[in-house]
Image (cartoon, rainbow, N blue to C red):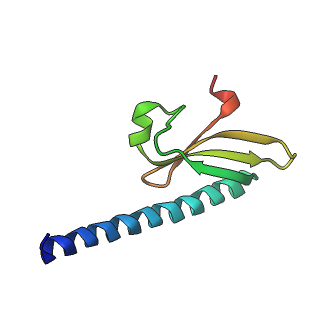
Amino acid sequence: MDLRTATATVALLVAAAAWALYVRLSDRDVLNAWAREEGLELLQKHSTFLLSYPFGYAGRYMSRSIYTVKVRDRLGRERRGWVRVGWDSSMVVRWRDDAA
């Protein structure tokens, strides 16, 4: 591998890592703001890289990220569901008990 190819490879890897970090931090802010606005405490969130249920196969590619979440409302009730964060930071939420 010559120097030019090595430099380009490193630059691409750095750019990909920077983009992944930006998305992760942006998603964190979007999810926290959503929970706050809805009066929820965000207990858990996990990125679901391949899993797109209940959004379907197309939902995976129409979104920036999909997370499984666990929240607690003001009355202390806990709910689980999925949150799809769009490329424009829009959000679609599907609760586990609403999926059936």
Q: Residue furthest top?
A: 100
Looking at the image, which residue is at 49% across and 36% down? 52
**Percent x, y of residue 21:** 46, 66
Looking at the image, the residue that sits furthest to the front is 1
Whether residue 41 sits left or right of residue 3 in the image: it is: right
50 above or below 99? below
Residue depicted at 79% across the width and 42% down the height: 78
Position above or below: 1 against 57: below
Residue 73 placement (x, y as % from top left): 80, 47
Which residue of the protein is positioned furthest toward the right in this rendering?
75
Query: In the rendered view of the protein, which quadrant contains the C terminus?
Result: top right
Position of the N terminus by quadrant: bottom left
Q: How many marks?
A: 0
The image shows residue 66 at horizontal and vertical percentages of 52, 45
Residue shown at the point (40%, 42%) measured from the top left: 62
Asked which quadrant contains residue 17, the reply is bottom left
27 over 11 or under it: above or below: above
Q: Nearer the viewer, residue 51 or 57?
A: 51
Name the residue rendered at 38%, 41% in the picture: 61
| Along the line of sight, the residue nearer the viewer: 21 or 74 | 21
Residue 35 x/y as whole percent: 69, 54
Q: Quadrant of residue 36?
A: bottom right
Left or right: 66 with respect to 16? right
